[in-house]
Image (tube, rainbow, N blue to C red):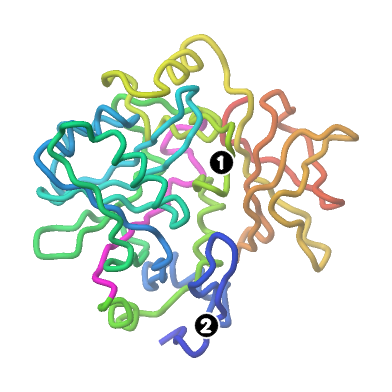
C-alpha cells in the first residue's frame, strides 16, 4: 500500500494539519488519476443545516437553486456580498433530512455565524460539526446512495442547465477528465477509512486540480473576486432563480459587461530548481498584470500554476513570475 501515516509529511498554510505527501507526490498523482488513492481532507470544515425549511431558506441566500434539490444530489453554491464578491463557497449535498456543507476550515465559524443571523423565524438549525465529522477525498464522480456515507460530488467543469461557461465547452475543457468527491465520515472512523486504500497527499490533489483549471476558495479568491472571473457561473450559479444577495452584480456583469479579471492556467519554466510562490506578481514587461494563486508540479505537465490576471492581458503573452516565464492556457476568455 502506498503511503502510511508514518511516511506522512504534514502540510502548512491552507492545507496545514493533514499530509502534504507520503514521500512520492508524483506517484501519488498517478494513483489518484487511476482512481486508486484517497486523500485526507479532515482539515475541511463541515456544517449541517436541519429543519423542514432548510432548502428553501438556503435557496433564498445562495446563488444556486436548492428548493427542488433531490436527496444525495451534489451542487456547488456561493454566498456573495451585497456587491457580488465571493464570501463563501459551499460544497452542498442533502441526504433527505440534513443539508451538509463542506467548506474551508477557516471559514466555518464565520459561515455558521452568518447563517444564524439570517434564520429569523424559520424552522432551521445550523451547527458546526467539524469536531464530529471528517472529510475524505477520492477520485470518484458517483453520488452516494442510502446506506453509504454522504458524499459531495464535484460538478466541475460540467455547465449547469441554467448556467453559462466563460471558457471552453465542457467537452473541450482542460478539466473534462476531472472526477472528485468529498465523503463525510464520522471522525472516529477516519483512520480506518484511509487505511482501506493507497493514500495521496494534498500536493498530489492540488497538482491535478490546477491541471483541471479548478478554482478553489481562498486560493484563487480574494476580497474582490466575482464568480465570472473564475468561470464559476458554469457550476455554482443558477441564472434564473429568485433573488439573493449579490444577484444584481452577477446579472449586470453577465448581461452588460465583462469581468475585470480572469483566472488562467500557467505553464512555468521548470529549468530552475525553485518555483515562484503563490502571491508572486505576474508581470508583462514592467507592468503588473496579476498574481500567482496556486503553484504545483504535475507528473506530466511539469511545473504549473493557476493565476488571476487583468482581463485585457493578451492571451498569447508570456508572463514573468519573479524571473520565471509563465505561458498562458486560457480558462476564461479575454
In the rendered image, residue 168 lying in the magenta stretch gets the answer: yes
Is the N terminus in the top left, top right, bottom left or bottom right quadrant?
bottom left
Tell me the tag on residue 301. Answer: none
Q: Residue 328 appears in which quarter of the rendering? A: top right
Tell me the tag on residue 221. Answer: 1
> Between 267 and 84, which is closer to the camera in this rendering?
84
Question: Are the two marked residues, 2 and 1, in contact with CB atoms closer than 8 angstroms?
Answer: no
Residue matched to label 2: 8
Q: Is residue 283 above or below residue 109?
A: above
Q: Position of residue 83 (x, y in %)?
A: 50, 22
For the point 56% across and 41% down, the residue is 221
Q: Position of residue 69 (x, y in %)?
A: 17, 37
For the point 51% across and 45% down, the residue is 215
Magenta stretch, residue numbers: 167-187
In the rendered image, residue 243 lying in the magenta stretch gets the answer: no
Mark 1 closeness class: few <14, some 14–19, many ≥20 residues within 10 Å: many
Mark 2 closeness class: few <14, some 14–19, many ≥20 residues within 10 Å: some
Q: Residue 220 appears in which quarter of the rendering? A: top right
Is the C terminus in the top left, top right, bottom left or bottom right quadrant?
top right
> Between 267 and 130, which is closer to the camera in this rendering?
130
Q: Position of residue 3 (x, y in %)?
A: 46, 84
> Between 139 and 108, which is closer to the camera in this rendering?
108
Magenta segment main secondary structure: loop
> Which secondary structure, mark 1?
loop
Amino acid at each position: 500500500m502506498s503511503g502510511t501515516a508514518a511516511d506522512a509529511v504534514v502540510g502548512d498554510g491552507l492545507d496545514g494539519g493533514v499530509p502534504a505527501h507520503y514521500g512520492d507526490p508524483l506517484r501519488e498523482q498517478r494513483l489518484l488519476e487511476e482512481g486508486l488513492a484517497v486523500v485526507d481532507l479532515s482539515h475541511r470544515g463541515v456544517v449541517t443545516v436541519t429543519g423542514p425549511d432548510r432548502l428553501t431558506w438556503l435557496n433564498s441566500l445562495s446563488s444556486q437553486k436548492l428548493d427542488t434539490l433531490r436527496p444525495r444530489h451534489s451542487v456547488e453554491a456561493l454566498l456573495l456580498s451585497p456587491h457580488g464578491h465571493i464570501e463563501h463557497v459551499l460544497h452542498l449535498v442533502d441526504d433527505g433530512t440534513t443539508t451538509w456543507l463542506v467548506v474551508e476550515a477557516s471559514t466555518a465559524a464565520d459561515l455558521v455565524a452568518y447563517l444564524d443571523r439570517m434564520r429569523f423565524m424559520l424552522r432551521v438549525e445550523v451547527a458546526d460539526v467539524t469536531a464530529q465529522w471528517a472529510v475524505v477525498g477520492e477520485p470518484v464522480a458517483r453520488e452516494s446512495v442510502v446506506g453509504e456515507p454522504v458524499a459531495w460530488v464535484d460538478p466541475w467543469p460540467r455547465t449547469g442547465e441554467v448556467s453559462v461557461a466563460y471558457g471552453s465547452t465542457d467537452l473541450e475543457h482542460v478539466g473534462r477528465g476531472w472526477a472528485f468527491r468529498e465523503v463525510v465520515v464520522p471522525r472516529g472512523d477516519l483512520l480506518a477509512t484511509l487505511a482501506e486504500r493507497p493514500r495521496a497527499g494534498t500536493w498530489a490533489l492540488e497538482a491535478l486540480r490546477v491541471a483541471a483549471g479548478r478554482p478553489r476558495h481562498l486560493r484563487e479568491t480574494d476580497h474582490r473576486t466575482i464568480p465570472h472571473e473564475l468561470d464559476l457561473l458554469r457550476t455554482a450559479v443558477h441564472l434564473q432563480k429568485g433573488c439573493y444577495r449579490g444577484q444584481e452584480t452577477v446579472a449586470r456583469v453577465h448581461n452588460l459587461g465583462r469581468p475585470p479579471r480572469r483566472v488562467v492556467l500557467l505553464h512555468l519554466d521548470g529549468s530552475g530548481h525553485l518555483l515562484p510562490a503563490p502571491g508572486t506578481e505576474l508581470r508583462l514587461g514592467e507592468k503588473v498584470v496579476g498574481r500567482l494563486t496556486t503553484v504545483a508540479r504535475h507528473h506530466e505537465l511539469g511545473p504549473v500554476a493557476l493565476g488571476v490576471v487583468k482581463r485585457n492581458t493578451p492571451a498569447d503573452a508570456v508572463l514573468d513570475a519573479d524571473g520565471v516565464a509563465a505561458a498562458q492556457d486560457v480558462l476564461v476568455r479575454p
